[in-house]
Amino acid sequence: MPDIALSLVKSGRAGWANDPDTPGGAVLVERGTGCVLLDPKGKVFPRSNPVSHPPTSGINEMAFIQHLRIAGNELYVPYMYKDSKDNVTVGIGHKLNNADMAKALPFVERGTNKRAHKNHIINAFNKVKNSSISGQAGHLKFQPLTNIVLSEADAVSTAGDDMDEFIRILRHSASFPDFDTYPESAKMGLLDMAYTTGVEGIKNIFVKFTPAVLCRDWQAAANHSNRGELSSLRNQIVRQWFEQAAKQEPFFVCRICTKRINLFFR
């Protein structure tokens, strides 16, 4: 590497980043902007081997569940209700796609804590699902419809199972192939987005967010992570998680920006 490029790396003004479009190597980029640096002749500084991103810490399950339970996020609701998109839901944001999913949960009768009969659970699910009450009315409107509930402990356990499933899907998603190596805060942000839209929803709805993650451009991911239907507090927390990741990983490739190194060095 030319001395000028080496001095930029040593000073922290530049570093190596993998370009998802050219696997197997890395290019020299400007810190924080992702601009690919070119030599005085307009050529990139190649690196024959890619940047290694070892696995990072896993997600703290209880910390994430506590995040979900902050007011305005996923409150603990013991009975079945419809969420804002009219999905039958229970516990800590656990969506019930059908009566069989409801039947698999350990519902008990309100007041007696006696295990609810499976037919009773099915009837309660159908009553909520077929109700003319909109989810926009809020969960309290659904409380009188059924007398079976899910305990807080079982709701927390179910939320943990949901987390594990979303993490499994994220790990195997082509959109986030290096999930295990992302900074922990970025993993938290992705998990929160998956919790509200599903992993496929992230790719299909947030069309600028997913390419940013693929490039590990965490600031751009933060800028494009807002979900209009959610509380400003929840969006702010997720944005801060990605901004924290940006501070940890300042080097990424911005395909639309290049700088000649002799100009950048001045």
Image: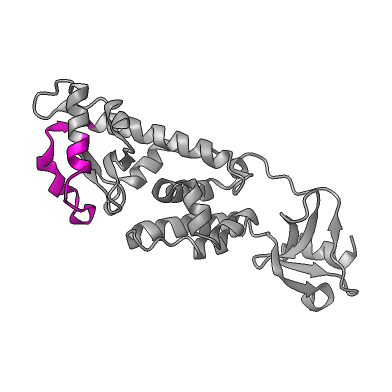
Q: Judge by depth and name the residue closer to the eye, 48 or 263.
A: 48
Residue sitting at x 89%, y 65%: 3
- Residue 216 located left or right of residue 207: right
Q: Which residues are magenta?
A: 125-151
- Residue 96 located left or right of residue 259: left
Q: Is residue 148 magenta?
A: yes
- Observer able to see residue 59: no
- Residue 205 located left or right of residue 33: left
- Observer able to see residue 179: yes
Q: Where in the figure is residue 225, as x and y percent of width and height?
A: 47, 60
Using the image, determine if residue 24 lies above or below residue 97: below
Q: Judge by depth and name the residue closer to the eye, 106 or 244.
A: 106
Q: Is residue 32 magenta?
A: no
Res 112 → quadrant: top left
Q: Where in the figure is residue 200, as x and y percent of width and height?
A: 50, 48
Q: Where in the figure is residue 49, as x and y percent of width and height?
A: 82, 48
Using the image, determine if residue 114 lies above or below residue 44: above
